[in-house]
Structure formats: C-alpha cells, structure tokens
C-alpha cells in the first residue's frame, strides 16, 4: 500500500485539533456562564489528573506505533500478536490505575486544591466515573497507535473528531438542561469519552482482527516494555511539567485563578495542535527510516516548524487581548491576555522541542527524553512556585515559557542537530521577542491589532523565504503549483496560451 505524502498526512492530522479549537471557542464561554469559574477550574484539574494517569500506559501506545510501523506489511497474525499483547497489558494496568486514581486523586484534590465545600462534595461523587474511564482510555490509546502505524490518519481523525465533539458538547447540554453540578457534568463527559474509546476499538478490530486471547505473547510484551521503559518516565513527568502550573496556581491562589489561567493556556495549547500534528505525522515515517534519513527529515522539519509556527504565534500574541475582549469580555481579557502573551513564546519553543523528541524516540532513544524530564522536574517546580508566589498567574506563565525554552535547546542538542539548524532559529525567535514588546504599546481594538498582526505574519514568511532553503523551496513549489492551476483554469500556459486554448 502506497503512503500519502507527509504534507497530506499533516493536513489530515490537523483536522481533529482544529475541530477541537472551534468546539472550544463555542463551549468554553457556555461552561463559564453555566457552571462558573470555580467549577470550570476544578474540571480542568480533573482532566489534567486523568491525563497524568495516562502515564500508566507505560509508553506502550508509542511502542506499538513504532513496532507496527516496522511491521507495516507483515502477516495479520504477527501484527495481531503485537496489538493484542498491548491491549492485555494496558487493560490490566488500567484497572489498577483506576483504583489508584480514585483514592489518591481524591486526596490530592482535597488537600492541595482550595475549593468550596459544596464543590468538594460534588467532586467526591463524580470521581468514580473518571476512575472507571481509565482502563478503556489506555486500551483505545493503543488502538489509535495501530491506526497511525499504517498512516491511516483520515480514519483516525474522523473517529477523534466524533469523540471529541461529543465529549465537549454533551456536558454543556447537561449543564444547561439538567444541572450545573459536577455530579452531572463530569459523568456525562466520562460517558461521552467512553463511547469514543469504544468506537476506536471497533474500527481496530475490523482492520486488524480477528483476535484471540491465545495471541498474547509475553515475549512480545518484554520487547514492548523494553522500548516503553523510558517512555514511562517521559509520560509521568512531561504531563506533570506541562500542567504543574495549574496545580500550583490552585494551591497558591485558589481555583478561581485557575480558570483565568486555564482558558488562555487552553487556547495556547490548542495552537500546539500544529506541531503535535506534525510530530504525529513524522513519527511512523521516521520509525521506518535509517538514522541518517531520519535526521535529514528532522532537520527539514525543524526549519519548517520554526518559521511556519512563528507566523501563527507572533500574530496571536498581538491579537490575544482583542480576542479575549470579544470572546469573553473586557474584564476577563485584562487578566487573561497577559498570560497568553507570556505563553506563546513557550509553545513555539515547545514545537521545536517536539521535533527533537520525535526524532529521538523514532530511533529507539526514548531513554534520552526520559532522563531530560527527570533532570528538569524539581528545578522547574521550584521556579514555578517562586514565580507564581511573586508575580501571580503571569509569573506562572513566564516560568512555563522559560522551561520550554531550555527544554528545546537541550532536546535539539541531544538529537544531534547541526549548528546551522540552531542559527536558523534566531530570526523567528527575534520576531517573537519583538512582538512581545510591541503588544504592550497597542490599543486592544481590532482596527489596531489586526493590521499589526497581519504585518507580523507576513514578516515571518519573508524571514523564512530569506533564511531557510527548505522554506524557500516549498514556497516556490506552491507558487508554481498555483500558477499551473490558474493556467489550467484559464486555458493559458505560463508563457502564453495553452495548446488548444483560446487566444
């Protein structure tokens, strides 16, 4: 079976996160209006907890994608053995993890997050639903890995769009028409996510089945766990690094402040859908390539990501205050916009880090990423606590961006990127720094911010064309393709009328 070009798979992988952004733009104001800032802050922390317990996957979803990518054309029985072994491991681990989540997740929320007694009681009644969801979530993660190993991104994203939309819309409807209590909203969200997981498993069974429990191979399990061993460290610590800010804000400032931070952070992380989709596209392709070819692909990917994503992050910084003002209101914008402006440089650095992360793991070096996360965890928690205590939620955002910056440079160095690759990062980095300064001198009206944002976006494209050979080549190729397309529509070639065309 022939593979789609990387750019096509990349576009397909943007479908789900882009839909997520659109749905969030509609549902977040409804959540805030109907359940309030405090309940929304608690919901954000609960979903973070579920994500944190995803570390119990032990790296197996990534391992199964890597293994099955190398077995793309292998017999069905061999692929089924790998996949069913992963399912068995994840189900057993998920059952144990669900118990741990129920016990220790409740204690964490009770003792480390400040919340009213009424909301605390609601959380206690809703938490069992989240605990029961964990085993199904872990199995569906392995199923999604099987689809991605075949680069069936259209099918995988169609299922994700269905599941994500249901999980976002159903709780809002429950809050509006039943009750804003978390005893209603959280179980509704859990059931919706469960239906999405079942849909993934049904499709995987149709593609990879039939399965038999006799296919579980403990020798295969050892291979998968060997690859996933250091992924375990990464999956424990990386989500914790990415979300510790909200826990510390909740502890230092209360759950209402979490909402003022979680909304801009959620928006910024939605923009990370672009590098995430790129990494998701690259991983199975890199996994099937030799080290030299994979490094060449990583170098091209880094250049494209640096300039392309800067063309999104820099204008977004300029528009953030205007966006929050019209989306939620001027009072919320006054608090949330500075947070978003401090976070966007960090998410850009995180995109660069993801290229090195994907390259290392595709070549079997998950140990490198795991060790880095271990080393940076405690220093980051200390800096985050100090910055949050001293400067509030903007300080937390600055600490997060600082960690992302250091993480990116170390990760790319460990991935053995060339000095020239680092030099190419300087122009877009300078553009982001300039945008962070400019935004403080602008009025938040759309008539002011939109033209400035457009200019900044164009500057990023121009910088890419001037400094990056890969960016220039792709730009010229797209321009030529557009000229050929227009010539075909008009019946004229680039130098005159096409053969048989009208003069």
Image (cartoon, rainbow, N blue to C red):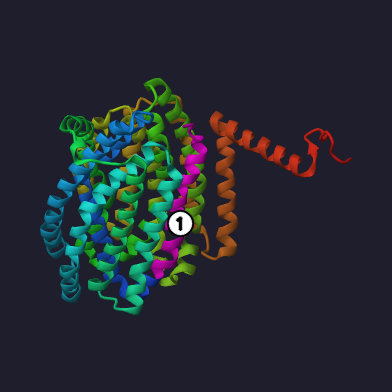
> Split into 4 quadrants, where in the image is the C terminus?
top right
Instruction: Please give the name of the residue rendered at 36% of the width and 71% of the height, measured from the top-left corner.
Output: 172
Vertical order, 291 against 187 (above or below): above
* Within-10-Å neighbours for mark 1: few <14, some 14–19, many 20+: some
Residue 250 in the image: x percent, y percent? 22, 62
Asked whether residue 491 is drawn in magenta, I would say: no
- Picture residue at 31% right of the left edge, 71% below the top: 37
Residue ranking furthest to the right: 503
| 18 vs 107, nearest the viewer | 18
Which x, y percent locates residue 396? 29, 54
Decide if residue 97 is in sight here: yes
Instruction: Name the residue tied to disc 1.
Output: 19
Q: Secondary structure at mark 1?
A: helix
Where is 243 relative to 34, above or below?
Answer: above
Would you say residue 376 is visible in this rendering? Answer: no
> How would you classify the magenta stretch by its main secondary structure?
helix
| Front-most of residues 87 and 23 | 87
- Tell me where residue 24 sits by quadrant: bottom left
Residue 201 picture location, percent across and down = 31, 49
209 relative to 279 in the view: left or right: left
Q: As rendered, which of 129 and 238 lies closer to the eye?
A: 129
The part of the image, by quadrant, that contains residue 475 is top right
Say how many tags the image has: 1
Q: What residue is shown at x 55% (from left), y 53% (from top)?
A: 453
Q: Residue at x 41, y 35 (%)?
A: 282
Q: Which residues are magenta?
A: 1-29
The x and y percentages for residue 222 are: 17, 31
Asked whether 14 falls inside the magenta stretch, the response is: yes
The residue closer to the viewer here, 89 or 237, is 89
């Amino acid at each position: 079976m022939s593979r789609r070009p990387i750019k096509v798979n990349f576009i397909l992988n943007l479908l789900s996160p882009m839909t997520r952004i659109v749905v969030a733009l509609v549902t977040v104001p409804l959540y805030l209006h109907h359940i309030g800032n405090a309940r929304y802050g608690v919901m954000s922390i609960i979903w973070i907890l579920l994500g944190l317990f995803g570390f119990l996957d032990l790296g197996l979803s990534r391992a199964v994608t890597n293994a099955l990518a190398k077995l793309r054309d292998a017999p069905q029985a061999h692929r089924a053995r790998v996949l069913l072994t992963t399912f068995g491991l994840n189900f057993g681990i998920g059952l144990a993890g669900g118990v741990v989540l129920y016990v220790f997740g409740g204690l964490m929320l009770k003792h480390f997050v400040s919340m009213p007694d009424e909301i605390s009681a609601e959380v206690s009644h809703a938490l069992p639903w989240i605990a029961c969801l964990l085993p199904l979530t872990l199995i569906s993660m392995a199923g999604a890995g099987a689809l991605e190993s075949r680069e069936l991104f259209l099918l995988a994203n169609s299922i994700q769009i269905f599941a994500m939309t249901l999980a976002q819309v159903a709780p809002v409807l429950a809050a509006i028409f039943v009750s804003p209590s978390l005893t209603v909203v959280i179980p509704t969200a859990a059931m919706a996510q469960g239906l999405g997981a079942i849909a993934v498993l049904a499709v995987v069974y149709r593609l990879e089945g039939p399965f038999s429990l006799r296919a579980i191979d403990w020798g295969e399990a050892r291979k998968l766990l060997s690859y996933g061993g250091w992924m375990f460290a990464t999956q424990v610590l990386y989500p914790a690094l990415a979300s510790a800010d909200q826990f510390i804000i909740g502890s230092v400032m209360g759950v209402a402040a979490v909402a003022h931070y979680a909304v801009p952070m959620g928006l910024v992380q939605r923009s990370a859908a672009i590098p995430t989709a790129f990494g998701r596209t690259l991983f199975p392709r890199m996994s099937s390539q030799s080290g030299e070819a994979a490094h060449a692909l990583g170098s091209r990917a880094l250049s494209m990501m640096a300039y392309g994503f800067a063309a999104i992050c820099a204008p977004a910084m300029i528009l953030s205050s205007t966006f929050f003002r019209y989306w939620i209101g001027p009072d919320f914008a006054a608090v949330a916009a500075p947070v978003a402006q401090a976070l966007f440089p960090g998410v850009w650095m995180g995109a660069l880090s993801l290229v090195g992360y994907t390259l290392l793991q595709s070549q079997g070096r998950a140990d490198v990423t795991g060790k880095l996360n271990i080393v940076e965890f405690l220093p980051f928690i200390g800096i985050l606590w100090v910055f949050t205590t001293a400067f509030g939620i903007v300080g937390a955002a600055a600490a997060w961006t600082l960690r992302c910056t250091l993480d990116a440079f170390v990760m790319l160095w460990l991935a053995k990127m060339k000095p020239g690759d680092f030099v190419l990062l300087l122009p877009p980095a300078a553009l982001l720094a300039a945008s962070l300064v400019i935004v403080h001198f602008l009025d938040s009206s759309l008539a002011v911010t939109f033209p400035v944002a457009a200019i900044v976006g164009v500057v990023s494209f121009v910088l890419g064309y001037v400094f990056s050979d890969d960016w220039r080549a792709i730009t010229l190729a797209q321009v030529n393709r557009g000229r050929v397309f227009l010539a075909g529509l008009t019946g004229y070639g680039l130098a005159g009328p096409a053969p048989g065309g009208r003069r």
